[in-house]
Amino acid sequence: MKRFLRNALFVIIGLLIAIQFIPVQRTNPAITREVKWNAPETRAIAKRACFDCHSNETTWPWYAYVAPISLRLASHVTEGRERLNFSAWDQPNESYSEVEKVLREDEMPLWDYLLMHTDAKLSDADKQALLAGLKATYANDPPIKKTRGGR
């Protein structure tokens, strides 16, 4: 049994080392067109709570370079940018009603993101201010609508 556990440990360590070589895309593409914010305060709240996954201004922390965390983080950012990207407002983006829904249902920011980014947690006042600001922002500068198939 001891021999089995030792061999299993070596296999696990080997796998952890091997997955470090899986290429992970950690880029910040050029900003093609940022949304025209209704107020600097709305942008500030969005930057604090949303920009790491929903803009081309992602801050890639040290753990974004350590697998398997790097794989999950890159996947979150890619999916987040595909749904809503405040730096690519000239591309299809989610509607205000969808953004409002995920914020009201506390689906965003993601719980695992909040573990390392406690400043991204939205208080009720922050959430109300962000929603009001986003509503005005969307009214003044609506995004290109998404089609049924995604983008």
Image (tube, rainbow, N blue to C red):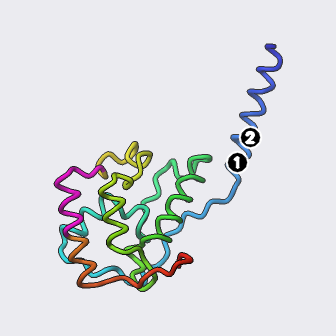
Horizontally, residue 118 falls left or right of residue 76, namely: left
Q: Name the residue under label 1.
A: 19
Query: Does residue 129 show up magenta in the picture?
Result: yes
Q: What's the mark number on residue 55?
A: none
Residue name at image x 28 percent, y 84 percent: 141
Residue name at image x 29 percent, y 64 percent: 46
**What span is colored magenta in the figure?**
121-132
Marks 2 and 1 close (CB-CB < 8 Å): yes
Residue name at image x 70 percent, y 55 percent: 22
Q: Quadrant of the N terminus?
A: top right
Picture coordinates of residue 106, whole percent (x, y): 34, 52
Horizontally, residue 41 falls left or right of residue 148, namely: left
Q: Nearer the viewer, residue 44 or 18?
A: 44
Residue name at image x 74 percent, y 46 percent: 18
Horizontally, residue 114 falls left or right of residue 126, namely: right
How busy is the neighbourhood of tag 1: few (under 14 within 10 Å), some, or many (20 plus)? few
Horizontally, residue 9 falls left or right of residue 86, namely: right
Q: Mark 2 points at which residue?
A: 15
Picture coordinates of residue 89, whole percent (x, y): 39, 81
Amino acid type at mark 2? Leu
Q: Which of 35 and 151 is in front in this view?
A: 151
